[in-house]
Amino acid sequence: MKKLTKNQEKEAKAMFTIFKNKYRGKDSFKLYTKNIREFFRITLDVYVFGDCEVPKNCGEWTKKGEWERSDAIKYWSELCKIKYRDINKYFCSVDDFSPYT
């Protein structure tokens, strides 16, 4: 995984602060950063651009062109082993920093 740029590092720290302080997230900064990078890789196209194609390296998907937001967030949470109760902590830390949809 590539190292974060200074700007990405600054943004990740701001989102992590929201995650820890507002949502009482328990993950370390290192784990948060790893998980949030996967979050963006997997969910960005479908959430922001409405692209329903499965991102590369996200396994086989039987229904072509039907990758939805719920599929993306479910895949991400399973891949990163995010507990159900923590999914919204991650999402809201991003969305509070800058609207994601």
Image: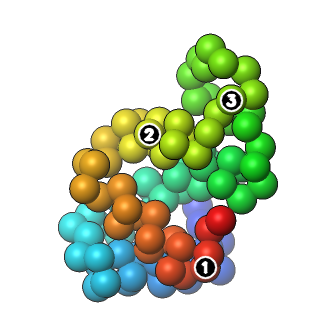
The earlier-in-sequence mark between 1 and 3 is: 3
Q: Are marks 2 and 3 in contact (CB under 8 Å)?
A: no
- Which residue type carries mark 1? Ser
Residue drawn at x 40%, y 76% is: 16
In the rendered image, the vertical position of residue 21 relative to residue 53, given as above or below? below
- Which residue type carries mark 3? Glu
Q: Are marks 1 and 3 in contact (CB under 8 Å)?
A: no
In the rendered image, the vertical position of residue 64 relative to residue 43, given as above or below? above
Tag shown at residue 98: 1
Is residue 85 visible in the rendered image? The answer is yes
The earlier-in-sequence mark between 1 and 2 is: 2
Quadrant where the image shows the C terminus: bottom right
For label 3, the residue is 66
For label 2, the residue is 74
Residue drawn at x 31%, y 41% is: 81
Residue drawn at x 31%, y 84% is: 22
Dot 2: within a 10 Å radius of its alpha carbon, few (fewer than 14), some, or many (20 or more) residues?
some
Quarter location, residue 99: bottom right
Q: Number of callouts in the render? A: 3
Dot 3: within a 10 Å radius of its alpha carbon, few (fewer than 14), some, or many (20 or more) residues?
few
Is residue 6 visible in the rendered image? The answer is no
- Which residue type carries mark 2? Lys
The earlier-in-sequence mark between 2 and 3 is: 3
Find residue 41 and report its horizontal and vertical position in percent: 62, 48
Separation (CA) of disc 2 from disc 3: 14 Å
At mark 1, the secondary structure is: loop
- Say whether residue 98 is left or right of residue 96: right
- Say whether residue 19 is left or right of residue 8: left
At mark 2, the secondary structure is: helix
